[in-house]
Amino acid sequence: MRSWRSRHEADTREIGARLAVELEPDGVLLLTGDLGAGKTVLVQGLAAALGIDPRQVQSPTFTVVREHQGGQRGLAHIDLYRLEPDEAAALGIEELLAGPGIKAVEWAERLPCPVADGIWLEIRRQGEERSIRERRID
Ligand SMILES: Nc1ncnc2c1ncn2[C@@H]1O[C@H](COP(=O)(O)OP(=O)(O)OP(=O)(O)O)[C@@H](O)[C@H]1O
Ligand SMILES: [Mg+2]
């Protein structure tokens, strides 16, 4: 399992960008980490590498799923922080994750369904820095 140290926001963006190649065309990126850990920053780096304007990638207060066009098949950005238990089925998250395009999930530990395949990263604050560790999916 890999791990990285990020000293600046730019480092985290770069790590996200490098994962784009691995995730194409249909991959799932699962992200765990506290508020302000840098999950969205990492997804912005991924988006930029996919030809999507990273400024479009934000953590909107009440939107669980946002789809961005660009590159080959686009990016679905999913933020489960405020997901209500009965919302998951209605939003079709399981189907979305199994579908085409790259999917990036913040607060992935709240996913209502198991994910068999993908890259799972845990981001932790260490003072001004961040440690990013790959986790095994099981
Ligand atoms: N090394 C770093 N990597 C990423 N972000 C950093 C780093 N150092 C400082 N930051 C700052 O930390 C914040 C990370 O915010 P971000 O929105 O990405 O967090 P998040 O994990 O998505 O939080 P939330 O769960 O609220 O969505 C930004 O303000 C960013 O500038
Ligand atoms: Mg976020």
Image (cartoon, rainbow, N blue to C red):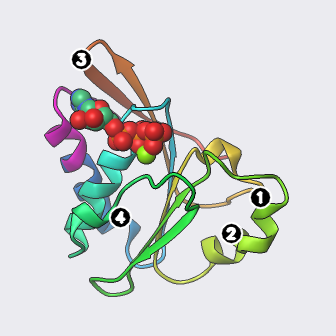
Discs 1, 2 touching: Cβ within 8 Å: yes
Counting residues from the start of the chain, the first of labels 1 and 4 encountered is: 4
- Tell me where residue 75 sits by quadrant: bottom left
Secondary element type, mark 3 = loop
Q: What residue is pinned by disc 4? A: 22
* Residue 95: percent from left, percent from top: 70, 77
Q: Is residue 55 visible?
A: yes
Tell whether 9 sits left or right of 98.
left
Q: Is residue 1 visible?
A: no
Counting residues from the start of the chain, the first of labels 3 and 2 encountered is: 2
Measure how far apart labels 2 and 4 are at the Cα level.
22 Å
Q: Amino acid at mark 1?
A: Cys
Query: 114 and 66: which one is in front?
Result: 66
Q: What residue is pinned by disc 2? A: 93
Quadrant where the N terminus is found in the figure:
top left
* Residue 64: percent from left, percent from top: 58, 61
Secondary element type, mark 2 = helix
Q: Amino acid at mark 2?
A: Ile
Q: What residue is pinned by disc 1? A: 113
Measuring 48% from the left and 76% from the top, which residue is drawn there? 26
In the image, residue 120 above or below residue 131: below
Distance from mark 3 CB to nearest ligand 1 atom below 8 Å: yes
Secondary element type, mark 1 = loop
Is label 3 or label 1 in front?
3
Measure how far apart labels 3 and 1 are at the Cα level.
34 Å
Measure how far apart labels 1 and 4 are at the Cα level.
23 Å
Q: Which mark is residue 128?
A: 3
In the image, residue 81 above or below residue 3: below
Would residue 10 be counted in the magenta stretch?
A: yes
Measuring 52% from the left and 84% from the top, which residue is drawn there? 100
Is label 2 or label 4 in front?
2
Discs 3, 2 touching: Cβ within 8 Å: no
